[in-house]
């Protein structure tokens, strides 16, 4: 996970010249820029301000992103990008040919600046083999010799919120000044995805016209980030009783079983969208909801960036480092003596940082946020 690698170091058109930040003057100015994006959804949201800063700094350049195929739809609504290059890498011999193909695709596009958001050796190898002359990134994973614009992470990259990591990287390597604006944290909703998810909701709802809340009960990192399924079930019933609200459970295909467990734990039941949406469709679905509740996860970061009322439940991880960004977010966190431990499982076996959080507290928080809109 890219977030783990970083800890080891521990809807305006942004190309408008009138909104451009003064760039560090690379000579000659880059005409074609490739950004290798990060590999996890939450990190993708948190790296967006740095990507927008590059767009503002070089408004006339062709700006492309290289990104895992399963995450590529994140940018479906991003008209401020010129190109999205999805890729996938198989295992064994097929993976070897996939990597050759990726390098060939990059080479054919003749980029003159490559910017590496991940810390991996392989990402630097790809852009070096593709012949990109200027290659920017943090020195990590024994790849320093392959970078031409390089720096070690400065203090601001590894303290405070993780969004600072990628902003510090583009700043420290001289790619751009990396100023920030409030709208840099916003993400784009693709119109066709929104239409499709509106139709899906209309067909799936039992109580049209009542509030609908999204809940993401799973987390890829492990059980130390997951509020218990029976607590989520009780929360669904509380929302139904107090607001006659419905709930849609969201997540990846691999998280559908967790969503089914949560739905079964409630008397009211819930719609289950997990496994039925790509990332772009998930963004659209969340944008249609009256609020979001979930663990520290990619869905949590999407909801916060969309500006819908977002209540984030934190267990083993540090909300000061990876909390949701956006204008309407609240974190529920029990800072115990052992917190944040950053572990996948509780070494004491009790998960008190999660089990001490009551469903009524979460319901109170999300309904208060919705009422104050």
Image (cartoon, helix red, strand yellow):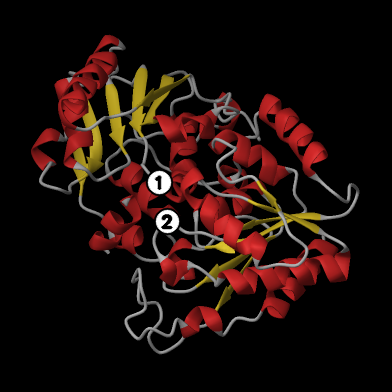
**Residue 363 in the image, given as x and y percentages of width and height:** 74, 72
Q: Is residue 91 left or right of residue 73?
A: left
Secondary structure of residue under mark 2? loop
**Residue 337 in the image, given as x and y percentages of width and height:** 40, 89
Secondary structure of residue under mark 1? loop
Disc sitting over residue 40 in the figure: 1
Of 78 and 230, the residue lying toward us: 230
Q: CA distance from mark 1 to mark 2?
A: 10 Å
Q: Is residue 15 above or below residue 200?
A: above
Of 290 and 28, the residue lying toward us: 290
Residue name at image x 57 percent, y 28 percent: 78
Seen as rendered, the residue at the extreme right is 209
- Label 1 or label 2, whichever lies nearer to me, is 2
Answer few, some or many: residues within 10 Å of disc 1's Cα (few below 14, many 20 plus, some between 14 and 19). Answer: some
Residue name at image x 28 percent, y 28 percent: 114
The answer to which image quadrant residue 231 occupies is bottom right
Q: Is residue 232 left or right of residue 92?
A: right
Residue name at image x 33 percent, y 21 percent: 29
Q: Is residue 317 among what the camera can see?
A: no
Q: Is residue 321 above or below residue 278?
A: below
CB within 8 Å, label 1 to label 2: yes
Disc sitting over residue 299 in the figure: none
Looking at the image, tell me whether mark 1 or mark 2 is earlier in sequence order. Answer: 1
- Quarter of the image that includes the C terminus: bottom right
The answer to which image quadrant residue 240 occupies is bottom right
Residue assigned mark 2: 220
Q: Is residue 280 left or right of residue 107?
A: right
Residue name at image x 82 percent, y 38 percent: 202
């Amino acid at each position: 996970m890219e977030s783990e690698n970083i800890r080891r170091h521990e809807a305006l058109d942004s190309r408008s010249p009138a909104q451009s930040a003064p760039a560090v003057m690379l000579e000659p100015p880059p005409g074609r820029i490739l950004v290798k994006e990060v590999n996890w959804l939450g990190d993708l949201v948190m790296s967006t301000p740095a990507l927008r800063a590059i767009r503002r700094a070089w408004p006339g350049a062709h700006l492309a992103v290289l990104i895992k195929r399963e995450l590529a739809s994140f940018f479906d609504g991003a008209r401020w990008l010129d190109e999205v290059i999805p890729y996938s890498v198989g295992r064994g011999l097929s993976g070897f040919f996939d990597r050759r193909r990726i390098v060939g695709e990059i080479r054919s596009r003749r980029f003159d600046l490559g910017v590496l958001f991940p810390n991996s050796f392989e990402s630097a190898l790809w852009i070096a083999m593709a012949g990109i002359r200027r290659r920017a990134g943090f020195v990590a994973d024994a790849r320093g010799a392959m970078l031409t614009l390089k720096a070690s992470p400065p203090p601001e990259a590894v303290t405070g919120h993780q969004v600072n990591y990628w902003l510090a990287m583009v700043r420290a390597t001289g790619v751009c000044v990396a100023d920030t604006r409030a709208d840099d944290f916003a993400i784009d909703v693709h119109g066709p995805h929104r239409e499709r998810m509106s139709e899906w909701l209309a067909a799936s709802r039992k109580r049209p016209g009542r509030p609908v809340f999204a809940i993401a009960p799973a987390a890829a990192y492990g059980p130390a980030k997951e509020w218990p399924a029976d607590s989520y079930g009780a929360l669904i019933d509380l929302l139904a009783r107090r607001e006659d609200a419905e709930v849609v459970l969201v997540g990846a295909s691999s998280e559908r079983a967790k969503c089914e467990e949560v739905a079964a734990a409630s008397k009211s039941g819930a719609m289950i969208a997990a496994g039925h949406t790509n990332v772009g469709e998930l963004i659209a679905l969340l944008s249609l909801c009256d609020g979001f509740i979930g663990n520290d996860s990619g869905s949590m970061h999407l909801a916060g960036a969309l500006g819908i009322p977002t209540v984030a439940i934190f267990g083993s991880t540090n909300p000061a480092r990876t909390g949701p960004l956006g204008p309407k977010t609240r974190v529920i966190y029990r800072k115990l003596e052992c917190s944040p431990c950053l572990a996948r499982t509780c070494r004491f076996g009790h998960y008190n940082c999660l089990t001490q959080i009551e469903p009524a507290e979460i319901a109170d928080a999300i309904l208060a946020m919705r009422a104050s809109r």
